[in-house]
Amino acid sequence: DTGVSQDPRHKITKRGQNVTFRCDPISEHNRLYWYRQTLGQGPEFLTYFQNEAQLEKSRLLSDRFSAERPKGSFSTLEIQRTEQGDSAMYLCASSLGPINTGELFFGEGSRLTVL
Amino acid sequence: GQSLEQPSEVTAVEGAIVQINCTYQTSGFYGLSWYQQHDGGAPTFLSYNALDGLEETGRFSSFLSRSDSYGYLLLQELQMKDSASYFCAVKGGGSQGNLIFGKGTKLSVKP
């Protein structure tokens, strides 16, 4: 049973550079979510997809952030012109349809450090 | 919008019982979830309450009172491996399609 996988697990970059994270959800899950988590805080919602359609974006998702799920399978989250405030853990999660039972399946996350 | 309040830290000893409370404010309520996250790990689902009352899953139980906008997670027979952060969460967002998480409660279990 393959869970949610994320790549890379760690990324260190200099301010102003672009970074891209990839998420592979559980294969039969049609919904995919991106969250951001900073130390000592809960996951903060960024955006989610149903198949290839992006259904909702948080106000946290500035225009430097873009997410795609082109074929309804894996997803990418790109951050352009990174800032030090972007340093965080970026978590991906998936679900089979709406989260009616309150359960999301999370990946281990991609930790971003912006110097 | 949605907001959730939970204590930031709780400390207990091995073998004891601990209760982690969560109060929420939400425009539409569908249920309360609980997640566990070990340092450096992924959040993992523990339980979900849609209706009032107590749900038991092994050493963990979760309670909901919709009239009080309140729930709690009860951990019994604490073990060292229970040291982790615990988050309550509700469905939220404009489409009610995602989960909104509290800031988490860091549980430290001492020998």
Image (cartoon, rainbow, N blue to C red):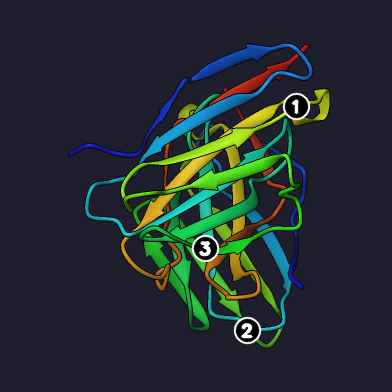
Mark 2 belongs to chain: B
Looking at the picture, which amino acid does disc 1 mark?
Answer: Arg
What number is the disc on residue A81? Answer: 1
Q: Nearer the viewer, mark 1 or mark 3?
A: 1
Give the percent coordinates (x, y) of residue A89: 62, 30
Image position of A8 (left or right of B86): left
User: Would you identify the image quadrant in which residue B108 lies?
Assistant: top right
Marked residue nearer the N-terminal end (2 or 3): 3
Q: Please tell me whether mark 2 sits on a helix, a strand or a loop.
A: loop
Mark 3 belongs to chain: B
- The residues tagged by marks 2 and 3 sit, at their Cα atoms, a distance apart of 13 Å
Residue B53 position (above or below residue A94): below
What number is the disc on residue B66? Answer: 2
Residue at the disc numbered 3: B33
* Residue at point 82%, 23% (across, down): A84
* Residue at point 77%, 44% (across, down): B8
Give the percent coordinates (x, y) of residue B12: 65, 37
- The residues tagged by marks 1 and 3 sit, at their Cα atoms, a distance apart of 35 Å
Are labels 1 and 3 on one chain? Answer: no
Name the foreground residue: A10 vs B14.
A10
Looking at the picture, which amino acid does disc 3 mark?
Answer: Ser
Q: Please tell me whether mark 1 sits on a helix, a strand or a loop.
A: loop
Image position of A16 (left or right of B53): right
